[in-house]
Amino acid sequence: MVKSPRAVPAVMIPHQPDCVDDALPYAELALRRRARRLWTGQSLRLDPLQLFAHLAGRGLRPPVGTGVSLMPLRTPYDAVVQARSLALITGRAVVMGYGPATPGFVASLHGAPYRSPRTAATEFLTVARTLLDGDTTDPTGEYHRPRTALTPTRPHPAVELGAGVLRPAMARFAAPVTDVAVTWLTPADYVRDVLVPALREGADDRPPPRVATVVHLAVDRPGRDPARLAGAVLSAHLSASHYLDMLRRAGVAMRAEDDLFVKAKQLVDAGVFVYGSPAHIARELARHRAAGIDEVILNVGGVQFTHGLHEALADLEDVFTAAEEHHG
């Protein structure tokens, strides 16, 4: 029996690598276990697209995705050219996922935050969509107003446009122009009940974007504290107002003034940080897929940051095996 691609997890490189060798174990595991895709977040140390191109030159060529890169670092034109170049170099599909970044980060690069982050993001994605579709852009935006088209090139694997999506308003704005909604820290029920309907509503007369969700997890092993693991990988997100707002909407009553350990424990108790036996984790991944999540991305950063690379890779191996057994 041939398994559906949706039943095969994807893998997240959980850290910002200092050198290519830091990412090699994850790339090798992704290929060995035939992972759906190899993902990375934004790195300000080693550029993700250059990292993937180097890995391809070493013969490691899984499908790849960025979940998510930060819009202030690139123009939409450059983002599309870089992603298309990667598809041409690797011969594999690419998801170019982008998000608007925090106001402080935008101000550090451009002198001031976006007046409207949603407008800036929508314009970025619309320009990128137009370019990927082979059309000429319309220079009427507030933040992005090029009048240009891509230089034609030979056929290449798909470049999918992705957007970081946490709340329904962004889902509705991104749906008409994106292929993938990339979510982070979003409970499965929240995706099913809030984000998927918003994506469908916003998509109007086109197919809604598929959902790719980063699931933070760890296998229950002696000497591990799940709240400590969750805090190690999610501390920055648990102090960000937009993540706290999303979690409250999802029913996780988290207060900004709470201690990091308290917040992290809430994530474990709510099943947002998935902790347990490999079989339990496999069942939870299946529950995410049943909620309408097309691509489940495994992030074992809490284990790597707390117990090291070897244990993080062991968790991934065990979860892949359990997921295979769960799906027969």
Image (cartoon, helix red, strand yellow):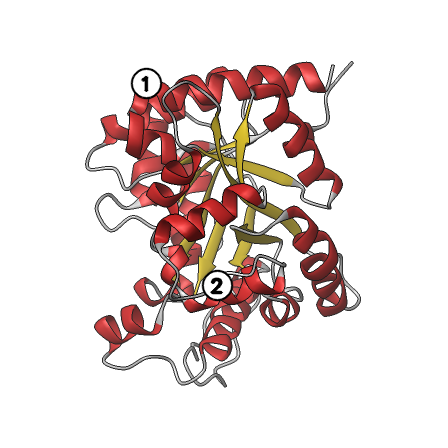
Please report the residue visible at 58 percent of the width from the left and 14 percent of the height from the top: 321
Q: Is residue 308 visible?
A: yes
Q: Which is more N-terminal, label 2 or label 1?
A: 2
| Left or right of 78 in this view: 107 | left
Which of the two marks, 1 or 2, is nearer to us in this view?
Answer: 2
Q: Quadrant of residue 231?
A: top left
Packing grade of label 2 (10 A; few <14, some 14-19, many >=20) is some
**Label 2 SS:** helix
Q: Is residue 151 visible?
A: no
Q: Quadrant of residue 103?
A: bottom left
Quadrant of the snapshot with the N terminus: top right
Instruction: From the viewer's side, name the closer residue of 89 and 109.
Output: 109
Q: Position of residue 188 (x, y in %)?
A: 66, 47
| Left or right of 20 in this view: 142 | right
Residue with the mark numbered 1? 310
Going by the numbered disc 2, the residue's amino acid type is Leu
Q: Quadrant of residue 313?
A: top left
Please report the residue visible at 23 percent of the width from the left and 80 percent of the height from the top: 111
Q: Position of residue 314 (x, y in %)?
A: 42, 17
Q: Position of residue 209 (x, y in %)?
A: 67, 55
Q: Residue 203 shows which numbered tag?
A: none
Please report the residue visible at 48 percent of the width from the left and 83 percent of the height from the top: 141
Residue with the mark numbered 2? 244
Instruction: From the viewer's side, name the closer residue of 161 and 156.
Output: 161
